[in-house]
Amino acid sequence: MTQFIDFNLIEPIQKALKEVGYTKPTPIQEQAIPLVLEGHDLLGIAQTGTGKTAAFCLPILSLLATRMTRREPKCPRVLILTPTRELAIQIHQNLLSYGKHLKQKYAVIFGGVGQGNQVRDLQLGTDVLVATPGRLLDLIQQKHLKLDKVEFFVLDEADRMLDMGFMRDIRKVLPLLPAKRHNLFFSATMPPEIQTLAQTILKNPKKVEVTPPATTVKRIQQSVMFVDKKDKLDLLVHLLKNENLEKTLVFVEMKHVADRVSEKLQKSGILSAAIHGNKSQGARQRAIQDFTHDRVRVLVATDIASRGIDIDGITHVINFELSNVAENYVHRIGRTARAGTDGFGISLVTGEEKSYLANIERITRQKIEVIEDQPYHSVSAARADVMSVGQAKAQIEGRRQRPSRGGGARGRAGGSGGGGSNGRSGGRSAGRPASASASRPGSRPSSSTASRPSSRPGVQKSSGPSRP
């Protein structure tokens, strides 16, 4: 069985890994680290939560330390490009942890905050720069940053870049990089545009694929609850009253819905916080920290967080609203079942969203269990006709103009450093939401797109993005 000590990583990194408790690599780390150390370009296909940050950071830091290149102002030696502020911050924190015994400097730049501290860090010189596309290009245009000395280029979450509309920015960055460089390219899925981009960037790459595209982690127990839109909030509160849902991430589609859901949970005595693109960077980081350290039990988020949060111990993911993009479902529920633990993904589905569900089942090639024994089970939603995703999307977006009780619509910045610790917290075990005392034994789940209505009352049982 491979251990981290078996890799040809330099001693200061091995020491840091021991201090944070890393002993056995994940599959992508086991495959990718030796290839990067050997100097190969790498195409990594892996879902969130597979450990890919360490898969590229560890060998890069090790190789960087063996080279005699001097650090220069405004000229990073490594560029890690990532789609969201949250993910950029977390990669930077990991760098500080892995490189705490190295004489390297790491910096992170992203939009939504003042650029003063970021410019200062660049002027002092940095070995590794983690950046979001918008702020990177802004600082290049202002001549605070040059990319002509980059030795390693990492493009992380490439398919998310596509989803968020950053392909044009990426294509602006590529000509600014030196022709001779070491390239690492990571994506959870490989749609045609991403395949073309990978072919443009990579030279004779080695491919590492630890999970087939658009599949879900096997340790996640998935379920669907059909519900009328007006009852969604009540069903969500009902589920979260069960304390077995220890650390729960709730996904919604709209920013204002995130706030509304969080407010409802708070009023119901359930400690929660919300994050979305309209929140300030400080507010978003406070919410993430409160969730990480169990000061709130529930974090309500839009998809900006579905692959921008890396928090251990999430026991449940609830899709309060399904995305019309099947891959988003995969990324959302991938926030749970980390580090060998079990996890639970629950989707609250209206009749209109049933078409999204059918598409998810088609893409992931699996039927998702339907739980009828819940107090808000909707027979009409369960029996709803399945239409195309486009038709369902148009219908849902049209109805969002009318408010409803169930969640419908109403009308210091990154710094550099060379030290820090970032340990892991252990995963938690969790069970299915408990049935109420009125629950009857012997109820059977049904297939989600052909579910049978219960014969008795249920019992408890994208416009253009802003630059990050």
Image: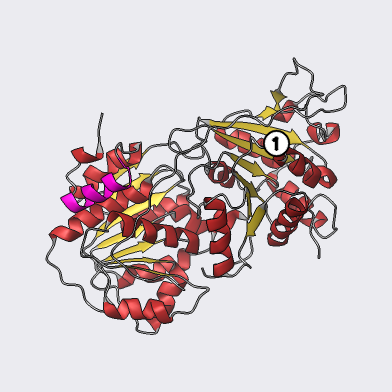
Q: Which quadrant would the N terminus be assigned to in this image?
A: top left
Relative image position of residue 104 (x, y in whole percent): 23, 65
Residue 173 lies within the magenta run: no
* The residue positioned farthest toward the bottom in the image shown: 142
Q: Residue, x 69% and y 34% (percent of image)?
A: 224
| Residue type for callout 1 | Asn
Q: Is residue 19 magenta?
A: yes
Number of numbered labels in the structure image: 1
Answer left or right for 113 relative to 402.
left
Q: In the picture provided, is 241 more to the left or to the right than 468?
A: right
Extent of the magenta region: 10-22
Report if residue 40 is visible in the image.
no
Query: What kind of secondary structure does the magenta stretch mostly adopt?
Result: helix
Residue nearest the observer in this picture, 133 or 333: 333
Instruction: Report the coloring of the rendering.
Output: secondary structure
Counting from the top left corner in percent of width and height, residue 389 is at: 69, 45
At a point 22% along the width and 76% down the height, the residue shown is 72
| Vertical arrangement, residue 257 with respect to residue 457, above or below | below
Kindly identify which residue carries mark 1: 242
Eyeballing the image, is 327 above or below 184? above
In-image side of 416 versus 399 (left or right): left
Image location (x, y in percent) of residue 398: 80, 56
Is residue 419 placed above or below 313 in the rendered structure? Answer: below
